[in-house]
Every structure is written in C-alpha cells, then in structure tokens.
Image: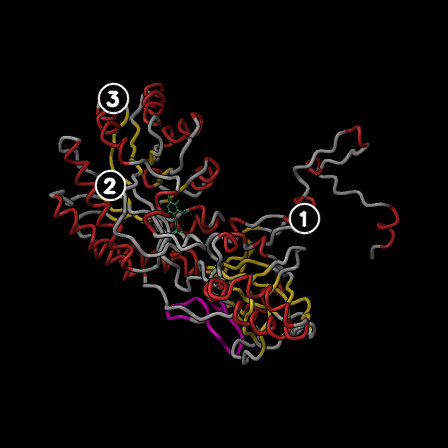
Amino acid sequence: MIQSGDCLSVRGGRLFIEECDTVDLVDRFGSPIFVTSEAQLRDNHRRFHAAFSAGWPDGPVDILPAMKANTTLATRHILSEEGAGADIYSPEELTGVLRTGVNPERVSVNGGGKSREHLRTCVEAGVRITVEDVFEIDLIEEIAADLGTQARVRFRVKPAVPNLWRRTDFSQMSVPIDVGHQVYKSGIPPEYLVEMGHRVSRMEHVELVGLHFHAGRHHKSLWFWEGLMTRFGRLIGDLCRAWNGWLPQEIDVGGGMASPRDPHNKEFPRSEFVLTALGYPFMVGLRGLGEKTYNNAMGKILGVLTGHREPKAPPTIEDYAATITGTLRAELARQGVPTEGVRLQTEPGRSLYGNTGIHLTRVKVHKRQTTPFPYNWVLTDTTVFFLAGGVLEHNRHPFVLASDVDAPANMTADLVGHSCYADQIVLGARMPAVSPGDVIAILETGAYQESSASNFNALPRPATILVSGRNAEVVKRAECVDDVYARDIIPARFGGAFTPQQGKGIPLPASVESSLP
Ligand SMILES: Cc1ncc(COP(=O)(O)O)c(C=O)c1O
C-alpha cells in the first residue's frame, strides 16, 4: 500500500502521514476526518511541472489543478503559492480560487451554458475563458466591448478518436473509448469550429489564444494518451490551415491521468465476468436444488462476486508527461505547426490530489452471520455519502488498519458505512480482525471525495485536517447539526419559529433536554 515518495509511512506498525500518527489524529480531531498532506501536494505539483517542462522545451508550462477535485481553500493557497493556475467550472469555484492569490491569466474557466453574469466576472477578472458553446463568443464580445477591454479565450475541442478502441473505464458496460468520448457532453463538435474561428477573428474584443482538449480518465494507459494527443495534434493542424495560418499561443491538454493507487472503476471487476458467464437465471435456477444447496452455493458464489484482483499500477507522472508532450510535439511537427514559444498547460485532478489525502474512520461494530450462509460486515462511522466521488466512479478504495498496518488479513468482510443504505465502501475486502474503536485509513481520497460529500441521513460532513510535518490543523471544520439544517425555513403556520440562520440552535423537546447529561 505504501509507495515510494509517499507522504505515508508505517512506524512501529502504525500508519503515519508525514510526521503525524493517524490514530493520534483521530484521538485529537475526532472521527471521521479527511486528512491532507501539504508536502505531498507541493511535491506532486513540482513533479508535474518538472516532468512537463522536460518534455516541452519549446515554451512555458503551466499546471492548472482541477479545483473540482478538491475545493478546500487551504490546499488552493498552497498551490497558488507554488505558482499553479487552476481549472475551474462554476462561478463559485472561480470566487474561491481568486481568493487564494492565483494569477488570473492562469485560470481556465470551463463549462457549458455560462451565464452572462459569470462571463462578465470572467472578463473583469482577466481569466482565460475556455469556450464550450457555439454562441458563447458573441456574448463575450458584447461584455468585453461594454467593459472596454479585451477577453482572451480558447476553444474546448472534441476531436473524434476512432483509434481508441479499448473499453472505457467510465462505463460499467463494455463500450469503446471513442463511443464513451462522444456521449460526454463537453467540447465543441468539430463541425462548428471552422466557422467559429472565422467569426472570432472578426471580433474586436475577443482574442482566440489557444485550444483546449479534456477527455477525462477513460483509460490509465500511455496507449490512451498517445492516441488522444495524436488526434488533438491533427485537429490543431487542420484548424491552423482552415483559419488562414492562425497559430496557438496556448495548448491545454486537460486532465485524466490516473492517480498513483488508481481506485477508479475497480469495484466489481470479477463479478462482471462471473455475472456474464453464470447469469442471474443460473442463480435463480439453483433454487430448484433445494434451500440448503442453494444457500451453500450462493455463499461460495458471493465470495467470487465480491472478490478482487489487484490490477497493474498506473504510469507515473513522469511517464504520462513524457508520452503526452512527446506525442503532441511529434504530431504538431508532422502538421507543420511550430511549437516555439507555445505555452503548454495541463489540468490534473485525481493524479495531483489523489494521494495527498486519506480518510480516517473508526470501526463501530463487527457484525457477522452464519446462516443461511456466512457473511461479515465491518461497520464504520463514515459513509459512502462522504466518499460520493468514489461511488460515481465505482472506486475500490484501498484501506489499512491504521493501528496495525501489517496485521495479517485473515478475514473477508464488507467495509460499510453507517447510513441506512447498504453503504458498501469496499465489498468483500480481505482485512485483519478489527474491534470497535479501531481506526481504518481509507487511502487515495484527496480527489473528488470531500468535494462531493453530501448529508444523507442528515449526517454532518467531516472536518479536513492539513498536516505539515508534525503540525496538524483544521482547515475545514466539521459540520454540526445546525449546519445540516441551515437552509431550512419553517413557515410560521407550522408554529416553528426556528430558522438555523438566526443561530438559535434546534430546540429539543423538554423531555429530551432534561435527559441530556
Ligand atoms: C475540464 C477539466 N479539466 C480537468 C479535469 C480533471 O480531470 P482528472 O481528475 O481526471 O485529472 C476535469 C474533470 O472532470 C475537467 O472537466
């Protein structure tokens, strides 16, 4: 589980993040909590910058971490200090990132259907607007003219990728990447681009400075990036010719590289095969053999369905950077597009933040059954609703027992959360015996987990702790019950005077109030 250059280490059998004992962190800050390593974040950013710069000697390189993957402002401050830009999507992400001292010229504002107000803020702030809609440039021209300024935009393109025939990781169904890529809403279809380029060239207040392409994490392989960059380079060449010799000042290759432990879409890999081979009718058919035989068989089949084999580790940051820059440069050279002075940008999300974070949770109960077939659950005080990004992406979260990392994994259980859903965090996990109060560390949660957490069952979302060497501090406080109900307004006709915004707290019935310690 521990990798080279990791912020994690095992000392005396316990899991440390930087110089902090993870069990001590839970004792001090409570459970569950998200924990972020400052050193890992800085190191990842520096590695990205160095690796892309080595492969792109032609011009400057910018790393624009995807804010959606981690919206905690303290982590953004660290990245702004490091000189990183940002990929942002919503007006609220823009507000957040601008508060952290980022250079606005290094902010890429993505997203379709941007409102007039949002675009006005973008033009005023001087950020790069990454255009997604066919008529967005007309609105930008109007706004920039009104403000008497110049807006700099890039087109987010969507080249066809028929060369990418392997199965996309985005779908649980077996669909080739090129098809999965087409059904993703983002990017301007190629059929509109030539006309848009001519239209923007006639505008007084909008300058087209570059092209942007983000496809997402369809496949962790370098093969995927070779295919992607070949088609991007080819489209850039086609557009330069169609736009009468226009040349890009900036090329943005987006994000989509796998994070080091890559939990993405690793849930159910065997079950998919087994289900296809055996199928539901077979399982139902087994009932004909009588209840005992059926339950014996299902107990065994479930072990296979929930079982798991570790796939190969993804490429490193340096491998990704070498392939992306090497393929793009070679294709642009073939297309006759000069790269001298061109600014190269990338927008890593999971690959930059993933291993900067862990999620710590305490075991509440170890629950077992022996009939009709044996089954085990380790119930924790967290929930998949705090790890919602992982649910959407079918993550199989790597985890360890923080107090005894090397303890032999001698049982199989589902690691579950305490909401009323099945709340399966990791199905059929091999793990050591655990007791109530033990701390489990779920690894690789730095991207998309805290930023997508929700309040199902009215559960308050956990705090985030930033660790730097021996120092640990709260950078996002845990919610309390009043936060959970903060947006509720109780109409006066229900006799409820309570509105949490007024800071009154939730009145409890007198009988409950008097029984409290
Ligand atoms: C435009 C854009 N850039 C970058 C990213 C980050 O992607 P990843 O986390 O896969 O690196 C995203 C994520 O969806 C995105 O939409």
Residue identifier under label 3: 204
- At x 11% / y 43%, what residue is drawn? 336
Where does the N terminus fall, quadrant-wise? bottom left
Which residues are drawn in magenta?
3-19
Horizontal and vertical percent position of residue 457: 67, 50
Where does the C terminus fall, quadrant-wise? bottom right
**Between discs 2 and 1, the one toward the N terminus:** 2
**Between discs 3 and 2, the one toward the N terminus:** 3
Q: Secondary structure at mark 2?
A: strand
Crowding near the residue tagged with mark 2, few <14, some 14–19, many ≥20 C-alpha atoms within 10 Å: many
Looking at the picture, the colour scheme in use is: secondary structure
Asked whether 15 falls inside the magenta stretch, the response is yes
Horizontal and vertical percent position of residue 342: 19, 43
Q: CA distance from mark 3 to mark 1?
A: 52 Å
What amino acid type is highlighted by mark number 1?
Answer: Ala
The answer to whether one can see residue 315 in this image is yes
Residue identifier under label 1: 458
Q: CA distance from mark 2 to mark 1?
A: 45 Å
Q: CA distance from mark 3 to mark 2?
A: 20 Å
Horizontal and vertical percent position of residue 34: 54, 58
Residue identifier under label 2: 250
